[in-house]
Image: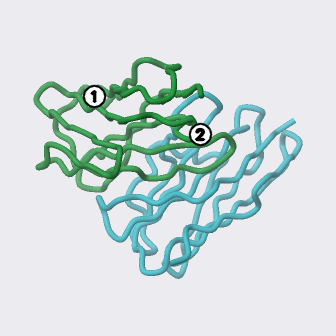
Chain colours: A cyan, B green
């Protein structure tokens, strides 16, 4: 069974530029999560989808971050414009349903200079 | 607001030793609790999932326990090996959405 796929694996941008990350969850998983992990900290949930609907986006900085999961399968997370403090690893995870065991992708390491 | 704490932040042990990693949480109304392993520069690998109605789960040399009333979970690693060296993260599932609240992790080094 294929795991959670993410791309790109690494990205370096200058502040005020925009960037997008892509995630393809495990086939059949209805719930998709985006987490931000700053160096030395545990991951923090940014947004959670159930199929193509948003379940929780309470910690998403909506003035600069956006995410979508239009067909209920893969998802994109966008940052525009980026700030220095956005430097982090962005992790995508999926689970079969709400509250299920979460499986994580390899992450995208973003460096904002 | 749920808060998850892991102590110690770092641990170094000789190979072969049995060890316990600790996780505490402030709100006992949890949905589940999950232990993960993270290798440097990599994503998270799920080790064990304990549902709120369960007391423990075992997988190979790993055993995780859950005590909701005291707000604690432990991850027991038997006969540690250098390959166990990694950061171990505890995450509590809150509410009925499965949202995970993570601790900051314990970085384990097992010396040959």
Left or right, residue B99 beside residue A49: left
Residue under the point 59% across and 52% down:
A91
Q: Decide: is A48 above or below B42.
A: below
B75 vs A72, nearest the viewer: B75
In the image, residue B98 lies at what x, y percent?
31, 54
B52 vs B54, nearest the viewer: B54
Dot 1 alpha-carbon crowd within 10 angstroms: few under 14, some 14 to 19, many 20 or more: many
User: Contact, CB < 8 Å: mark 2 with mark 1?
Assistant: no
- Distance from Cα at disc 2 to Cα at disc 1: 19 Å
Query: Is residue A90 shown to the viewer in this render?
Result: yes
Q: Decide: is B97 above or below A37.
A: below
Q: Chain of mark 1?
A: B
Residue under the point 62% across and 68% down:
A5
Q: Decide: is A26 above or below A92.
A: below
Residue named by callout 1: B25
Quarter of the figure with the C terminus of chain A: top right
Quick check: do tags 2 and 1 share a chain?
Answer: no
In the image, residue B95 lies at what x, y percent?
24, 48
In the image, residue B11 lies at what x, y percent?
50, 20
* Quadrant hosting residue B18: top left
Left or right, residue B7 beside residue B105: left
Q: Give the SS element for disc 1.
A: strand
In the image, residue A99 lies at what x, y percent?
29, 58
Q: Decide: is B25 above or below A101.
A: above
Residue under the point 27% across and 40% down:
B64
Dot 2 alpha-carbon crowd within 10 angstroms: few under 14, some 14 to 19, many 20 or more: some
Q: Give the SS element for disc 2.
A: strand
Query: Is residue B10 shown to the viewer in this render?
Result: no
Label of residue A34 in the image: none
Residue named by callout 2: A37
Q: Chain of mark 2?
A: A
B91 vs B54, nearest the viewer: B54
């Amino acid at each position: 069974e294929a795991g959670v796929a993410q791309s790109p694996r690494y990205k370096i941008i200058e502040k005020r530029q925009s960037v997008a990350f892509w995630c393809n969850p495990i086939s059949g998983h209805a719930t998709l999560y985006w987490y931000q992990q700053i160096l030395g900290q545990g991951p923090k949930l940014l947004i959670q989808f159930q199929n193509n609907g948003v379940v929780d986006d309470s910690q998403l900085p909506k003035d600069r971050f956006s995410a979508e999961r239009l067909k209920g399968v893969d998802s994109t997370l966008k940052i525009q414009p980026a700030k220095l403090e956005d430097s982090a690893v962005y992790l995508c995870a999926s689970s079969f349903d709400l509250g299920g065991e979460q499986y994580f992708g390899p992450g995208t390491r973003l460096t904002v200079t | 607001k749920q808060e998850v704490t892991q102590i110690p932040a770092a641990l170094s042990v000789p190979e072969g030793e049995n060890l316990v990693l600790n996780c505490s949480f402030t709100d006992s109304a949890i949905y589940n609790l999950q232990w993960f392993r993270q290798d440097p520069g990599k994503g998270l690998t799920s080790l064990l999932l304990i549902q709120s109605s369960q007391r423990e789960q075992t997988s190979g040399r790993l055993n995780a326990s859950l005590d909701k009333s005291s707000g604690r979970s432990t991850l027991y690693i038997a006969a540690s090996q250098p390959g166990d060296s990694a950061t171990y993260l505890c995450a509590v599932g809150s509410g009925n959405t499965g949202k995970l609240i993570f601790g900051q992790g314990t970085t384990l080094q097992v010396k040959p």
